[in-house]
Image (tube, helix red, strand yellow):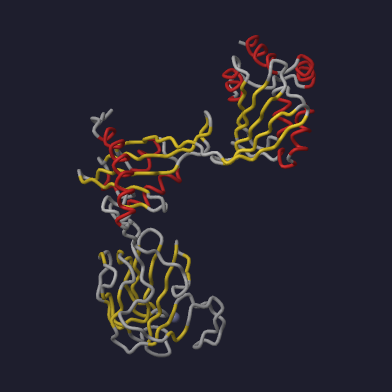
Amino acid sequence: MLSAYWLLVGRLVSIDSLQQVSIKNSEALLTRNDPDLTLIADSLHSTFFTHKVIKQQTLSEVFQLYGLNPDDLLAMIKANPQAIQLREGQVIEWQQDELGRILELAIHRNATLSSSYLRQGTQFVFQPTVTQGTLKSLVRHGYIRRNFYQAARQAGLNNVQIQTVANALYWFVDVTQPDVIGDQFAVELQQPWVGQHPMASGKIAAIWFKHHGKNIQLVRFSDDKFYDMDGVSVEKSLNRWPFTQTFPVSSPFDPHRLNPVTQHYAPHYGTDFATPVGTPVVATGDGVVMKVGRHTLAGKFVVLQNGRRFSTHFFHLSQILVNQGDFVKRGQVIALTGNSGRSTGPHLHYELRQHGQPIDAMQAPLPQRVVLTKQQKIVFDQQAHHSMSLLQTYLKLPISLN
Ligand SMILES: [Zn+2]
């Protein structure tokens, strides 16, 4: 195998540079399992070559590796000084004539942008080209034996893809619960390819989750949001105000506020509304009651979890109308305002947190439930039909339990 290796490299590296390498490095430039060697082997019978850039590799290193003429490199840099900037994972393709001269070299910078260098005599002409890489559909499917995460990993999904699936399904099924054991899923991944190479691990395009025999089907539309088969976004709306009427803001969200009671600087992570005691407080979004209780500072309080991203917090209440674990709908009355805890007068302290971080509930962009228009729905239906037909074939397969 060793002789074959030298033969392979010998085809591409001139004898001089090969000798240099073997003198300078007692170790071979490439090992048998090196992916670069496979690329070289693939290119043997063609004058087209391909190289996938590894971490911190420069274009001149690539030139050295393949025994390309450094003068050509200089001519390319002259044509475009940015030529030498490479990133891990980028793909370089080039064509050589029988004398080993580069005729054309293209660097695929991402799925749609390539730089190409075309020989003209001893010079190169630089052309940035925007090419549409092809999208390839892949299906990953699995049967949940122990937990969703393990099944998804086994199916070949990475952590980002698993998180995306879990988030999209959140309002239909909580995949982190043991309740999903015995469920099946199939997801469509769309991977951008340029030439023979995937440029990314792929985006989740569609999800089919069979939960206790119930079908949950979601498709990602051109706006990047997931929709159910009726064309309704899985993302639910969050209202700005926790009342059905308006009340004045007595103290806004202010991370640097002077506390009116203690006279110390203390962050105010909520918005205070001056309201008469007994004013109905409504949930700003669908959710689950995470906690109800009583606290020295917050008084009687309610905390709602509104989907995976948001939680809402209501303090200084006089009466709580929900219990921990209850599901609540947006607009549902959950409590009555009061003056409990540390408070200078009747008011509601309303706090919005995103991934646990308090944000200004009066300013932050809030998620909106979207219903596709008739026109959009026509496009969506075609896409959904295509995706679901693809996924269905995988879900029909009998499950092997070994
Ligand atoms: Zn407050």
Left or right: 52, with 173 as reference point: right
**Count of numbered circles on the image:** 0
Q: Quadrant of the C terminus?
A: top left
Q: Nearer the viewer, residue 99 or 340?
A: 99
* Percent x, y of residue 384: 31, 44
- Identity of the residue drawn at 40% across and 36% down: 137
Q: Nearer the viewer, residue 386 or 215?
A: 386
* Percent x, y of residue 192: 48, 38
Left or right: 402, with 37 as reference point: left
Answer with the quarter of the image where residue 22 lies.
top right
Q: Quadrant of ligand 1?
A: bottom left
- Identity of the residue drawn at 31% across and 72% down: 283
The residue positioned farthest toward the front in the image shown = 120
- Identity of the residue drawn at 37% across and 88% down: 346
State whether residue 391 is above or below residue 8: below
* Percent x, y of residue 84: 72, 38
* Percent x, y of residue 117: 68, 33
Q: Nearer the viewer, residue 213 or 78?
A: 78
Q: Quadrant of the N terminus?
A: top right
Answer with the quarter of the image where residue 248 lies.
bottom left
Left or right: 254, with 386 as reference point: right
State whether residue 372 is above or below residue 152: below
State whether residue 58 is above or below residue 330: above
